[in-house]
Image (cartoon, grey):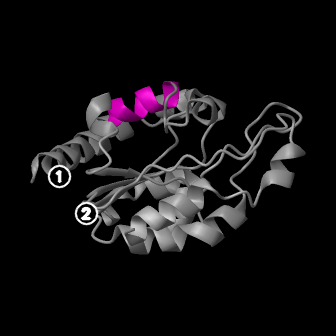
Amino acid sequence: MTQISKLKQQIAGCRLCAARFAATQTAHKPRPVVWFAPGARILIAGQAPGLRVHESGKPFTDPSGDRLRDWLGLTAAQFYDQSRVAIVPMAFCFPGYDAKKADLPPPRICGETWHDQVMEALGDIRLRILVGGHAHRYHLGSRTGVTEVVQGWRDHAPGVFALPHPSWRNTAWLKRNPWFEAELLPVLRARVKELMSND
């Protein structure tokens, strides 16, 4: 068994947060969504699965995923090609809802337990796409707001692109920041296309 295969098996069997999830409004059981393989050249570093992804067992099977695929210029088949694209959230399980039905943040114990191991196992990632503030903080060490980090995208391109979360909740953000779609996305799509076409 390869290092990555063993690691995927360990993460899939993780139950560290069982008691934490049982105490949420959803009272659900852990279901790690593990989506990476050897040879991937693009990393999508997300936040945590939502309820729909928890149910499907496949990352970004929701409207956020539709928007993200549009941002990247990828078809669903390309996006889910694990030999090219690794999808590694800061927490592998759906964290649950709070009393107001809002998503809880990714439990820190997940990232602290697994993330460094996954990054080491993946090796030669050519492009890191950081989705949301939690991913920005881990991969860039940022301590500022999402807008400021995303505005500084030229400081990290072409190896890293920091994005806002593609949730519908950020539709107003996109309207307030038209430069994101006009300036950042064309460069990101070109980089993604380049890496997806290289063998």
Taking the magenta stretch, the answer to whether it contains residue 193 is no
Q: Residue at x 47, y 66 (%)?
A: 6
Out of 43 and 77, give the one closest to the viewer: 77
Above or below, 15 relative to 94:
below
Give the amino acid at mark 1: Leu
User: Residues at badges 2 and 1 in contact (C-beta under 8 Å)?
Assistant: yes
Numbered circle sitting on residue 26? none
In this view, the residue farthest toward the front is 1
Whether residue 51 is visible here, answered yes or no, is yes
Out of 39 and 46, give the one closest to the viewer: 39
Q: Which residue is mark 2?
A: 126
Q: Which residue is mark 1?
A: 195
Taking the magenta stretch, the answer to whether it contains residue 67 is yes
How many tags in the picture? 2
Q: Residue at x 75, y 61 (%)?
A: 16
Quadrant where the C terminus sits is bottom left
How dense is the environment of label 2, judged by Cα within 10 Å: few (below 14), some, or many (20 and up)?
A: some
Q: Secondary structure at mark 2?
A: loop
Instruction: Calculate the distance from the C-alpha at mark 2 to the C-alpha at mark 1.
Output: 8 Å
Q: Secondary structure at mark 1?
A: helix
Residue 44 appears left or right of 198: right
Magenta range: 63-72
Q: Residue at x 57, y 34 (%)?
A: 53
Precedes in sequence: disc 2 or disc 1: 2
Whether residue 141 is visible here, answered yes or no, is no
Q: Residue at x 66, y 62 (%)?
A: 110
How dense is the environment of label 1, judged by Cα within 10 Å: few (below 14), some, or many (20 and up)?
A: some
